[in-house]
Image (tube, rainbow, N blue to C red):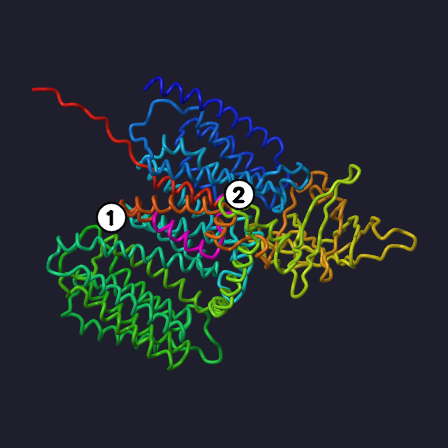
Amino acid sequence: MAVHAAMARLAARPLALLAGAACMLALRHYPLGHGWPGLLFAALLPAYFLLLCWRPACWLFCVPALLPVLDLAPWTGWFFLEEIDVLLLLTVACGYWRLGGPAHPAAARLSPAARACLLLCSLAWLAALLRGVLPLAPLDLNAWDNYLSPYNSLRLGKAWAWSMLLLPLLLRDASASALRRYALPGMLAGLAMVTLFALWERTVFPGLSNLSSDYRITAPFSAMHTGGAALDGYLALSLPFAALWLARASSRWQAALAMLLLALALHAAFTTFSRGLYAALAAAMLLGFWQTLRTAPGAARRVPSQSPTRGVLLRLLLAGLGTVLLVYMFSLAGYRGLLAAVVLLAASFVLAARPLPWRLAPASVLCALCLQGLLAAWWPEPSGQQTAGWLKGPYFLFLLAAVLLVGALWPDSAGGKAGKVSTRLGLAMMAWTMLACNLAWIGWHWAGPPALPPAGLVVLLAMLMLCNGRLRPPLWRLDRTSLSIAGAAGILLLLAIPVSASYYATERFATTAFDMQGRLRHWRQALAMQPPDWGDRLFGMGSGSFPATYYWHNPQREVPASIAYADEEGNRYVRLASPGYSAGYGELLRLLQRLPVQPATRYTLALDVRRTGPMPVLLARLCQRQLLYAQGCVNVPLRLRPPPPGNPPEGWQHYEVPFDSAWLGAGAWLLRPPVQLELAASGTATSSVLEVDNLSLRAPGGEELIANGSFTQANNYWFFSSDHHHLPWHIKSMALHLLIETGWCGALSLLALLVLAGHRLLRQTARGDAGALACAAALLGFLVVGLFDSLLDVPRIALLCYLMLLCALLQPVPPPHVESAPP
């Protein structure tokens, strides 16, 4: 064993030194000088290095936490080599240096079947990588900043390479206890940061309650600058672990935090308006329900007086009826009616698990009706003006009843006599009656008499729920599990019902059939672009080859817009090519840079322009933009002049245009929308080219705002975006993406890996492992989203999926066999 450890250390340390040298080389060239994120990243790396030196297994927390959010491409312009790659180089360097030490007693291993599948996947990956990158193209200015480059194969292939490099560290560190201690909190931390980012983006751009806008969030995923479903895939992978945390919460504070995280994550999921993500969430919930039914026979042995399946069906019937009534209530009484109905049903859920003093019910109801009538008469609507907000009669009295109910049900730490408990429960029944009355009043106040029938039906359902305590056994008890499930269901309905009824969501669902026809047409065209050669069918066209294939060989003979950097006699500049479409709208490709613009300030934009082809138009403007969908733009009044007589039309022309920034850059620090400079070439149906150099944006004091305006550093600090037309960049199907780019070998080997991991997870789930159920639900949701988007062309999302698959395949090392001594 000692010899084996020494050999492992001897083989690992050269790789550690190589990874460390690569990390230092990457940092030497990395653009970190524009904006605060670069400074944050520069401070993060030393802290992460010290953390790994102190506790090596902490990478299990840091990698899933930082994988979705450590994305600075909109600031740096680098998207082939990313910040997460530098972090992983440091992880491999520190981890491999200590590899081969004493084995952890709870270390993991891989089964022979898992090793065979990983070997087949690695061979298929290597074949697709070589087919994409060979023959080697010159390492020019566009080798590492263009999706049309053959080196795009390396960008996509790095996800599997990282997973295989991290596999030895997983085998050393990823025991079951370490995954619970590090990896699960890391996933939750990453999800929390993504959801806060999504909440900020919704607040700053369309508005938190604006559900009619067609704005779709991208959160921190810069890979969505050409569309795709990186955010959808990440939420599908991480949301089940928020539910797992809620189910495993060991204290009230943990349950409250888990409930808050679940609410934020569901809000982010619903406001993506992604039908694929909605289907993924439904599939994950169906898997959880199926597992509940599978484990029901165990409950039957404990409680033989009632069939557990019958109890589950009654709960589902009650939940379905409540959902229908809440939708009915929302359709007539809006947000206020929906919120009031949910509060009444939640109060009924809590009260129904208490031993209610039914003998006091008539007196409680009568007292409540009298009190409600007196307060309603004492709080009339003022004549001539409307009282604002919660001070209106029905809202105020509903809030008062809710406070009274909470006070009556608040747990008494000193206990209490039976009479005191009965009195408090009687007060709770009074408060419940007032809630029911004010629910009807809120509906009538909002929508008039038509809102009374749904309010009455909700009250009737709440009364039926109060009978739960008289069933033997009751359908639910007031324990942490029941409260968690009820709270999650309430959050789900409060978010899902308004979003599904919004204008944009309704429009999305109405166009599902039409969009599906367009997706099917795109899939047929993608398959038609695959050469009929047996090698391409067996091993694929190469990783990352689809954008270039579409650019040169799409059946419509479209010429998508492009951005490239050129070098002419030592002078570097950017070349913007307008789209060339025979019919319809050609999506522009916008060159972007984030700028610290101040409002109501006079700026001067200066640049040199050279044009070729038909009469092109250079669009220059400053816009409020996160990644896609510019808003609040200020156009720079730039009009290209015809060349002077006698000058060649391809000569450089200099422009200086003053303009006012107007409202851009205004707002509080945290709620200030980022401002970006946009450049795009537009023209006729025939593609034309504009070349730009010496770009400058100066403030009145002469301060230069643009970094790398002369493009001497090529794409440093410059990013780009295609806002609407995303088909030239993605196959839009994970299965087709694998089949076309990696061939039948890659698709079948990954399918075998998925089947093996899924089988192992389901076996663990059948034994009652909630973590395995969450992992299975995450992978199932990811696959459902992947039915309509090629998720594996986003390296960081692909890496997260691969790491989850590897964790699902890990098995604990069996304890050494100890021979019993003879008597």
- Inspect the image, locate mark 2, and give the three-letter code of the amino acid beneath it: Leu
- Which range of residues does the magenta coloring cover? 775-796
Checking the image for residue 270, the label placed there is: none
- Inspect the image, locate mark 1, and give the three-letter code of the amino acid beneath it: Ala
Is 779 covered by the magenta stretch?
yes
Dot 2, crowdedness within 10 Å: few (<14), some or many (≥20)?
A: many
For mark 1, give the secondary structure: helix
Residue 637 visible within the image: yes
Q: State how far apart marks 2 and 1 are (Cα).
A: 36 Å
Residue 257 visible within the image: no
| Rendering coords of residue 771 (x, y %) | 31, 45
Q: Quadrant of the C terminus?
A: top left
Q: Quadrant of the N terminus?
A: top left
Q: Nearer the viewer, residue 484 or 815?
A: 815
Dot 1, crowdedness within 10 Å: few (<14), some or many (≥20)?
A: some
**Callout count:** 2
Check disc 2 and report the residue beneath it. 156
Q: Is residue 544 left or right of residue 497?
A: right
| Rendering coords of residue 142 (x, y %) | 66, 42
Check disc 1 and report the residue beneath it. 766
Depth check, mark 2 against mark 1: the one in front is 2
For mark 2, give the secondary structure: helix
Q: Is residue 651 left or right of residue 419?
A: right
**First of labels 2, 1 by sequence position:** 2
Q: Is residue 522 left or right of residue 719?
A: left
> On the image, which quarter does residue 182 sit in?
top left
> On the image, which quarter does residue 40 sit in?
top right
Q: Nearer the viewer, residue 481 or 160?
A: 160
User: Is most of the magenta stretch helix, strand or loop?
Assistant: helix
Vertical arrangement, residue 382 with respect to residue 715, above or below: below
The furthest residue to the right: 646
